[in-house]
Image (spheres, grey):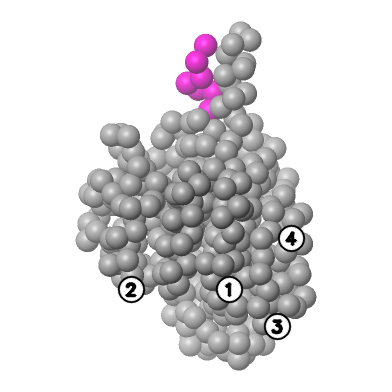
Amino acid sequence: MFLYYAIYLQKNIAMSTLGLGNALVDILLRLENERSLTDIGIVKGAMDMIDENQMVVIQRTLSHLERNRTPGGSACNVVRALAKLGVKAGFIGKIGADATGRYYEQALEEAGVAPYFSIDGDITGCCTVLISPDGERTMATFLGPAPALTPGDIQPGVVALYDYIYIEGYLLVNEPLVRDAMQKAKRAGVKVALDLSNFNIVSAFKDVLDDIVPRYVDILFSNESEAKVFTGLQPDEAIHRLAEMVGIAVVTCGKEGAVLSGGGETLRVKAEGGKALDTTGAGDNFAAGFLYGQSAGGTLEQSALIGSMLSGHVISVIGPQIPDGQWEQIKLKIDAILSRTADY
């Protein structure tokens, strides 16, 4: 019994993760109807890049709507969730010298994430997330200083403090930064996880991805549209092509769950949760759960089940973060998943 308990405890000591991504504050607005999207000239489901003036106009036009504010950005969402699970987590990003930037940094510290921020300019980036009545999200993103990260902002000593680095694909617009981060990780013996983030990003930087994915990436996350653009294949076929390039490949398929491949094993897991209230952060929380499972010694299936469970929790709330009151229950569920094949 003691041997089993010692092994079980060891499996639940998850390895640390450093996030690298755009530091953006999410402003979440619940739309009364989809006509509002037409009024501001944004197509439902799109992720449009906007300037500061457009951001002000949109938020002023929709100022009557219920809103929530939360630190966002894909990599930030992942490391926040990992920190809630007790994992040592950090985040590298760039913010402005304003109250919004101070809010962002403080929110990460309160969540247990170590912030490694550089400051540039006066206004922190903001993503206005417009949530339709059916739960689908449309995003209008003002990046601010977020994409102005440079290789000099990534200190090798910081990278070496962690076991994993999670990089969001949006940063591929800054190819030298992504390459530098991956090279520093490899030199430090740190595993690289990359999320493809957006099918437009994949389309624009496919040649870059063809080079860096097999060279540097250990775990590749994508959704079905991103996988289709990258490989030209549907998820059940794309997963095999992706798995030839990396150690582990994950393709999320919304309400159809996810398909995964690694170590010669391919499997599909069902989606958890009921009708989505808001899908913001669903993929990010799946990635966080999966990384937790892998770093805690879980199998491919166990890791996928943890990812699906976290994703199911976050779609039941507004915003990309699971409420604090749910984490103790989540930890118990994770313990149950990880203990199913524990060695006696």
The residue wearing badge 2 is 204
**Mark 1 or mark 4, earlier in chain:** 4
Instruction: Kindly state the secondary structure of the residue where label 1 is placed.
Output: helix
Q: Are marks 1 and 2 in contact (CB under 8 Å)?
A: no
Q: Are marks 1 and 3 in contact (CB under 8 Å)?
A: no
Of the numbered discs 3 and 2, the one sitting upstream in the chain is 3
Q: Main secondary structure of the magenta part?
A: loop
The image position of residue 84, as x and y in percent, is 67, 45
Which quarter of the figure has residue 61?
bottom right
State whether residue 209 appears in this view.
Answer: yes
Q: Which residue is outermost to the top?
A: 1
Rendering coords of residue 165 (x, y %): 52, 51
Lower sequence index among marks 3 and 4: 4
Residue corresponding to mark 3: 122
Q: CA distance from mark 4 to mark 2?
A: 33 Å
Of badges 3 and 4, nearer the viewer stands 3
| Residue 146 - label | 1
Amino acid type of the residue that numbered disc 1 sits on in the rendered structure: Ala
Mark 4 or mark 2, earlier in chain = 4
Q: Amino acid at mark 4?
A: Ala
In terms of sequence position, does the residue under pointer 1 or pointer 3 come before the other?
A: 3
Q: Which residues are magenta?
A: 338-344
Query: Which label belongs to residue 210?
Result: none
Note whether 111 is above or below 177 in the view shown: above
Q: CA distance from mark 1 to mark 3?
A: 12 Å
Cα separation between marks 1 and 4: 17 Å
**What residue is shown at x 70% (from left), y 83% (from top)?**
122
Which kind of residue does numbered mark 2 sit on?
A: Ala
Q: State the image coordinates of residue 308 (x, y, percent, origin top left).
A: 48, 44
Numbered mark located on residue 107 in the image: 4
